[in-house]
Image: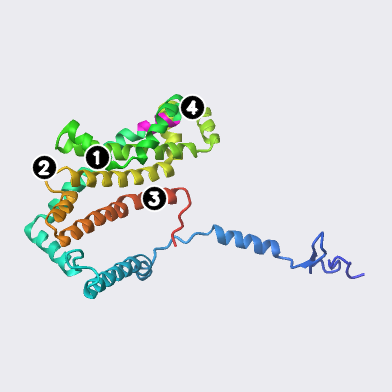
């Protein structure tokens, strides 16, 4: 007898086909090898450098196209006369305002006055919000007492702090930093609390077993485990800090404070200069985008790459 009913050739010792144990349907031999090859393909990661042309098409072309569309719609509204001239300045007028500020040497002063305040205030909020978040997340009594207050402060509009800050501290930089802290600290602390809450309890128990307790556990176990939520809190904290600063600069005006972007926006409103108003809005938006692209986006990519969640193709 040369073969059996199961499809196994006894004489030659070759497997021609296999039967599924339940349905009896034939399945090709080598299916397991194909599955292993597919898993190997999934595990392989291409780490080669992305060509410049592909980078330009995927990352540079889309925002440039969006900006071009906005300019086309904006200019079309100006030409159509739908909106009166005193309500909507043309792109050419805004460009002229930008060029004038550059030639006068005041453009960089506007930007630096606000950016320096915003970054310094954010760093102060980082120093205060990080230990506060650790304390709230790790001490139940503190969490029950302060947790709801932090959530309430985070939902409170930053502009509400400007009048009392002016009364308490006067018209100087300390008032600006106080408003920034009250806007940014709750977001940073709540982000860290959310990140710590998402750490698997097994990691914490393993850390305690290995002797990582107290400050050592916070540095080696808690902070690395909470890094994604903490980074999200930092990003939101910067957004609150920047918005708080703009609100303070718009409301509080003094020669000692200088002219930042918020004060430039208020000056445009006072002078009924829509070109100056749009220039201030453009610069505020530009600073926010630049900080995100230069600081927070690289940090996010580093965190995702270190955890194997970002594949470079």
Quadrant of res 227: top left
* Label 1 environment density (alpha carbons within 10 Å; few <14, some 14–19, many ≥20): many
Q: Are marks 3 and 2 in contact (CB under 8 Å)?
A: no
Q: Report, in whole angstroms, how far the alpha carbon at label 2 lies from the one at label 4.
A: 55 Å
Main structural element of the magenta stretch: helix, strand or loop?
helix
The stretch drawn in magenta includes residue 133: yes
Q: Nearer the viewer, mark 3 or mark 1?
A: 1
Residue 121: mark in rendering: 1
Q: Reading the chain from its start, which is encountered first: label 1 or label 2?
A: 1
x and y percent of residue 277 in the render? 18, 58
- Which quadrant of the structure image shows residue 223? top left
Q: Give how far apart the Cα atoms at labels 3 and 2 are.
A: 38 Å
Q: Is residue 253 found left or right of 297 in the rendered image?
A: left
Q: Are marks 4 and 3 in contact (CB under 8 Å)?
A: no
Q: Residue at x 11, y 45 (%)?
A: 258
* The disc label shown at residue 211, or none: 4
Element at label 4: loop
Question: Which dot, 2 or 4, sits closer to the camera?
Answer: 2
In the image, 255 versus 188, the foreground residue is: 255
Q: Which mark is residue 300?
A: 3
Query: According to the image, what is the colour scheme of the structure?
Result: rainbow
Above or below for 135 versus 10 = above
User: Mark 2 sits on what residue?
Assistant: 254
17 left or right of 164 in image: right
Residue numbers of the magenta segment: 131-137
Most distant residue in the right direction = 1
Q: Nearer the viewer, mark 3 or mark 2?
A: 2
Residue depicted at x 13% and y 48%: 259
- Answer few, some or many: residues within 10 Å of disc 4's Cα (few below 14, many 20 plus, some between 14 and 19): few
The picture places residue 104, in percent across and down from the top left corner, at 7, 58
Residue found at x 28% / y 43%: 241
């Amino acid at each position: 007898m040369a073969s059996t009913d199961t499809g196994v050739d006894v004489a030659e010792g070759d497997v021609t086909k296999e039967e599924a144990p339940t349905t009896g349907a034939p399945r090709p031999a080598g299916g397991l090898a194909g599955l292993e090859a597919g898993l190997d393909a999934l595990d392989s990661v291409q780490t080669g450098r992305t060509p410049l042309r592909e980078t330009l098409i995927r990352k540079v072309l889309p925002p440039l196209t969006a900006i071009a569309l906005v300019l086309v719609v904006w200019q079309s509204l100006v030409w159509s006369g739908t909106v009166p001239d005193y309500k909507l300045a043309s792109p050419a007028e805004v460009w002229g305002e930008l060029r004038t500020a550059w030639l006068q040497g005041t453009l960089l002063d506007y930007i630096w006055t606000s950016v320096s305040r915003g970054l310094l205030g954010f760093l102060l909020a980082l120093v205060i919000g990080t230990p506060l978040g650790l304390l709230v997340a790790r001490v139940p009594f503190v969490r029950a007492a302060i947790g709801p207050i932090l959530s309430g402060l985070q939902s409170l509009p930053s502009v509400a702090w400007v009048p009392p800050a002016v009364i308490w501290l006067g018209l100087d930089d300390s008032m600006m930093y106080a408003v920034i802290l009250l806007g940014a600290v709750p977001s940073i602390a709540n982000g860290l609390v959310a990140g710590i809450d998402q750490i698997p309890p097994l990691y914490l128990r393993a850390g305690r077993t290995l002797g990582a307790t107290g400050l050592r556990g916070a540095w080696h176990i808690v902070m690395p485990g909470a890094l994604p939520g903490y980074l999200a809190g930092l990003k939101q904290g910067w957004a609150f800090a920047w918005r708080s600063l703009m609100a303070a600069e718009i409301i509080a005006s003094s020669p000692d404070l200088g002219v930042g972007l918020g004060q430039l926006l208020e000056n445009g409103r006072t002078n009924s200069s829509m070109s100056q108003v749009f220039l201030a809005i453009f610069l505020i938006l530009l600073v926010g985008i630049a900080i995100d692209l230069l600081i927070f986006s690289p940090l996010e990519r580093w965190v995702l790459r270190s955890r194997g969640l970002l594949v470079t193709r």
